[in-house]
Image: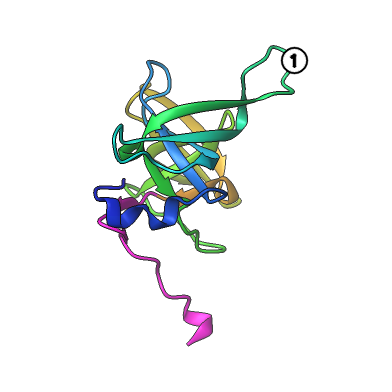
């Protein structure tokens, strides 16, 4: 998450970002959005237009909302064709967002069983619907992007 105004360079108008929603039922989830208005130094808020969350019942008008900039991060990197291990923290794509969970078992066919602490649910996912969980800390990803051995 952003922690200083110097780090806001990656949150310019038009930038693709993710935002952590803190409402009940959404804790531990990240949703894709585009920066519609840069962060205000006075309020610390940024205007985002969500990609998959709608503000109307017909699903035609994308939700626009001011959120605290500390809840916003760039879109995390993903390693192509990554295998996951038991106990690894992952983000799983579900219900139009990325949800933080932990791999509790490796299944056949590149599938994984993931447990979500926030909702106390367990679900199975294809490896293509998972990414390694990363935090945005002082302008860097933790853990950093892994080197692809095929490119060395």
Question: Is residue 65 at least partly visible in the picture?
Answer: yes
Q: Residues within 10 Å of mark 1 (few under 14, many from 20)?
A: few
Question: What percent of the width, then of the height, locates residue 110?
Answer: 57, 52
Q: Which residue is mark 1?
A: 58
Question: What percent of the width, then of the height, locates residue 8?
Answer: 36, 52
Relative vertical location of residue 86 with respect to residue 96 in this rendering, above or below? below
The answer to if 60 sits in the magenta stretch is no
* Residue segment shown in magenta: 133-152
Quadrant into which the N terminus falls: top left
Figure coloring: rainbow
- Element at label 1: loop
Question: What percent of the width, then of the height, locates residue 67?
Answer: 40, 30
Question: What percent of the width, then of the height, locates residue 22?
Answer: 35, 24
Q: Residue at x 44, y 28 (%)?
A: 66
Residue nearest the viewer, comparing 35 with 23:
35
Residue nearest the viewer, comparing 7 with 146:
7
Q: Residue at x 72, y 20 (%)?
A: 59
């Amino acid at each position: 998450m952003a922690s200083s105004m110097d780090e806001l360079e990656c949150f310019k108008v038009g930038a693709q970002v993710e935002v952590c929603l803190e409402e009940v039922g959404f804790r531990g989830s990240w949703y894709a959005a585009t920066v519609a208005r840069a962060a205000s130094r006075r309020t610390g808020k940024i205007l985002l237009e969500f990609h998959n969350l709608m503000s109307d019942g017909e699903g035609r008008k994308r939700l626009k909302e001011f959120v605290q900039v500390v809840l916003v991060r760039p879109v995390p990197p993903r390693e192509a064709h990554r295998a996951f291990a038991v106990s690894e923290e992952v983000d799983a794509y579900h219900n139009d967002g990325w949800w933080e969970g932990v791999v509790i078992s490796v299944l056949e066919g590149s599938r994984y069983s993931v447990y979500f602490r926030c909702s106390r649910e367990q679900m199975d996912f294809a490896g293509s619907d998972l990414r390694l969980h990363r935090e945005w800390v002082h302008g860097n990803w933790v853990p950093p992007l892994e080197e692809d051995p095929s490119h060395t």
